[in-house]
Amino acid sequence: MMRRLFPHPLLSFMLFIGWLLLANSANLNNLILATLLAILVPLATQPWWPGRPRIHSMRLIGYVIFVLGDILRANVEIAAIILFMPARKILSVWITVPVDLPDPEAMALLAATITLTPGTLTAEFSTDNKALLVHVLHTRNPDAVRDAIKSRYESRLKRIFM
């Protein structure tokens, strides 16, 4: 019954929370509208989700907590760079990160993670979806950044998207 009502539970959850955040109010009308959106949009779009990936929900929650910690740490690092490092010493680089993820959703989540982390930005997917072009605000070792993205994020996403 629940699977029929919520064919895409993560999408339903995100629509519900997203609507409440956009409305900036949790009054009864907004709760009802958020619930309707969370139920109707996934049901209406279900035909266009033929090969939906299987997601390990508990690992996804752990991943979100892990990424939030990285975002906090990166905020401090980027603030120190901006406030205390002379502009001529900032070493911005573009790096290509090869990606070996099973689903387009996993690749999109990796790109979003990189972009959400201060100091990095995903600029482009390769045409074959096997690499990301990433801009890094400051690094002396682009290879270490590439390896960190693969080991810290991509490896976890492989375990989340079964």
Image (tube, grey):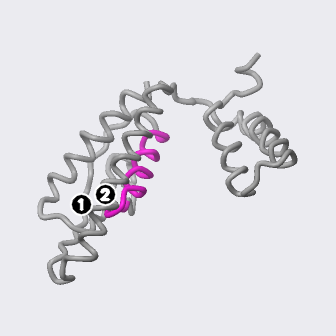
Q: Earlier in the sequence, mark 2 or mark 1?
A: 2
Relative to the observer, which residue lies in front, 69 or 145?
69
Q: Nearer the viewer, mark 2 or mark 1?
A: 2
Q: Secondary structure at mark 1?
A: strand
Q: Relative to 34, is 121 above or below?
A: below
The magenta stretch spans residue 103: no
The magenta stretch spans residue 115: yes
Query: Image check: 61 left or right of 157?
Result: right
Could you tell me which residue is drawn at 47 percent across and 24 percent down?
Answer: 56
Q: Position of residue 62 (x, y in %)?
A: 42, 32
Could you tell me which residue is drawn at 25 percent across and 69 percent down?
Answer: 80
Relative to the observer, which residue lies in front, 18 or 102?
18
Neighbour tally class for label 2: few under 14, some 14-19, many 20 plus, Cα within 10 Å: some
The magenta segment is 104-121
Residue that protrudes farthest toward the right in the picture: 29
- State which quadrant residue 138 falls in: bottom left
The Cα–Cα distance between marks 2 and 1, rounded to whole angstroms, is 18 Å
| Residue contact between numbered discs 2 and 1, judged by CB atoms under 8 Å | no
Which label belongs to residue 95?
1
Q: Position of residue 134 (x, y in %)?
A: 31, 60
- The N terminus sits in image quarter: top right
- State which quadrant residue 99 falls in: top left
